Image (cartoon, grey):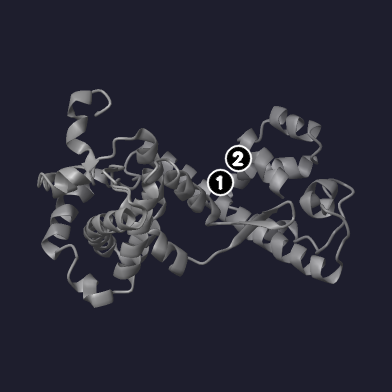
Amino acid sequence: MLTLLPQYQDLFVYHLQAITQEHQVWRLLCARLVCLDIKDSFCSSLLIYNFRIFERRFGTRKFASFLFGTWCLSALMDFLLAEAFQFLFYYEVEELPSGLLAPVFSLFVPFYLSIPRMPVTQVLGRIHITNKSLVYIVGLQLLTSSPFMWLLALSGLISGGLYHSSVLRLQKILFVPIWVSRIGQYILEPVFSSSQPTSETPLGMGATLDVQRQQRMELLDQQLLLAEYNEARTNARQQPQSGLLQWTRLFPSLRHRGQNRVPVQPRPQPQAHQSTQPPFLDNSPVAEEQVARLVEMGFSRIDALEALRASNNDINMATNFLLQH
């Protein structure tokens, strides 16, 4: 909105000299909440959305108290770091990037200390990619967007460390009151919350059955993938293979599908298999055209029939089911 109204952008500039010399204290509220750069606003929004894990872990009030406490501490740290930079390098910092930036950088402190690092993959065999790598990359992009963004980053990290360690009992001094959280609960929660699907009407009942069927298939996929993963890890420990890529682990189901499939475990009897399937899936008709399309892809007719019955004749879902298993 401020890009469309350039005449009001001066009100949200984080000008340190105007605050200290001209006593424009209102700039601390305006300039440290509204972001004037679109790229900074996008990166900080991504980081705040990712850091909602602390809201789910500690609660909304504690998460909001952390943002409020680090916002107040970083305002003091900004002036102290600017004065220290002027004293050491004889350069006066006049303006800093606007927006809710310092509290965003302060969230990296609990993110680094409390979130475990789990390896995802490797690049070139040595560079490890974890579940936290993307967050650090976005933070680095935000850090290099402005010349003095490093000052706000350092201010946020110091404020986050002080508040997280509860130095001088800052968590008991800077916090969101209970009445403020209750106002947000009664006003904001009904606006942004969504209702669960109901089955009062026939359309809702059909939608509920589709949701249940999809959830059942996803649960089955997770169980089978977990079993295949554990079996692959056991085989890899017992019989290590040479080479960069182990192709037999990438495509095990496609090579053993059909009549040439090697039976690893005894297949259950048809009666026991039918007892575990829901009755509305076994009696559902299967289109011969879709069975022929799956057979042309290389799958057996029996597997194609089972996949189409499980997916309610959805050719895309049946194809994904066969490729994964």
Secondary structure of residue under mark 1: helix
Q: Position of residue 303 (x, y in %)?
A: 75, 45
Residue drawn at point x = 20 percent, y = 48 percent: 188
Position of residue 133 measured from the top left corner of the image (x, y, whole percent): 55, 54
Residue 306 seen in the figure: no
Q: How many marks?
A: 2
Residue type for callout 2: Ser
x then y, percent, for residue 291: 73, 33
Question: Which residue is at the front of the view, 185 or 206?
Answer: 185
Question: What residue did someone put label 1 on?
Answer: 280
Q: Which mark is residue 165?
A: none
Task: Please state if 181 lies on the left or on the right of 258 as rendered.
Answer: left
Type of the residue with mark 1: Phe
Of residue 256 and residue 26, the one placed in the foreground of this image is 26
Q: Residue furthest bottom?
A: 168
Residue indicated by mark 2 = 284
Residue 111 image offset from top left, x and y in percent: 43, 62
Q: Nearer the viewer, residue 122 or 168?
A: 168
In front here: 234 or 324?
A: 234
Q: Secondary structure at mark 2?
A: loop
